[in-house]
């Protein structure tokens, strides 16, 4: 029968303890990582909701600005047309006055 040395007898339990410690460390580090990811997810979900609300407000503002710019464009077209008519009327008056003064 082979003799088991004292070092061999104490080596097996110390290996088991080392494996147990490493296993516990891995389990705890995995749990801590999952907990941290869960917390990060909550923060990111809140930030996403805030961004969605801000985007909705900006889209609403953009629609209001677009309609305001459209009404300004219509008004500018009217003013441009009035300006052309006024210029034509002014030219007609000036040419008529010049023609009348020559006669």
Image: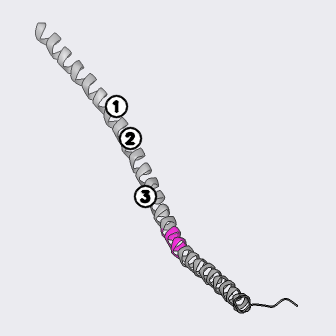
Compared to residue 70, the image places residue 47 above or below, namely below
Residues drawn in magenta: 43-50
Q: Nearer the viewer, residue 11 or 81?
A: 11
In front: label 2 or label 1: 2
* 32 left or right, relative to 53: right
Between the residue at mark 2 and the residue at mark 3, the CA separation in whole angstroms equals 18 Å
In front: label 2 or label 3: 3
Give the residue at x 46% y 65%.
54
Q: Which residue is mark 2?
A: 73
Between the residue at mark 3 and the residue at mark 1, the CA separation in whole angstroms equals 30 Å
Q: Nearer the viewer, residue 77 or 50?
A: 50
Q: Colour scheme in the image?
A: one colour
In front: label 3 or label 1: 3
Q: Do the residues under discs 2 and 3 have CB atoms within 8 angstroms?
A: no
Residue 4 location, x and y as percent? 78, 90
For marks 3 and 1, the one nearer the N-term is: 3
Specify the quadrant of the image occupied by residue 98: top left
Between the residue at mark 2 and the residue at mark 1, the CA separation in whole angstroms equals 12 Å
Q: Is 48 part of what is drawn in magenta?
A: yes
Q: Nearer the viewer, residue 27 or 14?
A: 14
Q: Which residue is mark 3?
A: 61
Is the residue marked by circle 2 packed among few (<14), some (14-19), or many (20+) residues within 10 Å?
A: few
Q: Do the residues under discs 2 and 1 have CB atoms within 8 angstroms?
A: no
């Amino acid at each position: 029968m082979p003799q088991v040395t004292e070092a061999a007898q104490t080596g097996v339990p110390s290996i088991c303890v080392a494996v147990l410690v490493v296993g516990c460390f891995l389990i705890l580090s995995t749990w801590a990582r999952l907990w941290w990811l869960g917390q990060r997810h909550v923060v990111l979900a809140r930030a996403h909701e805030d961004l969605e609300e801000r985007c909705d407000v900006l889209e609403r503002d953009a629609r209001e600005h677009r309609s305001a710019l459209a009404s300004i464009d219509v008004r500018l077209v009217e003013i441009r047309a009035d300006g052309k008519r006024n210029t034509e009327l002014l030219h007609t008056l000036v040419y008529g006055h010049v023609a009348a003064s020559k006669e």
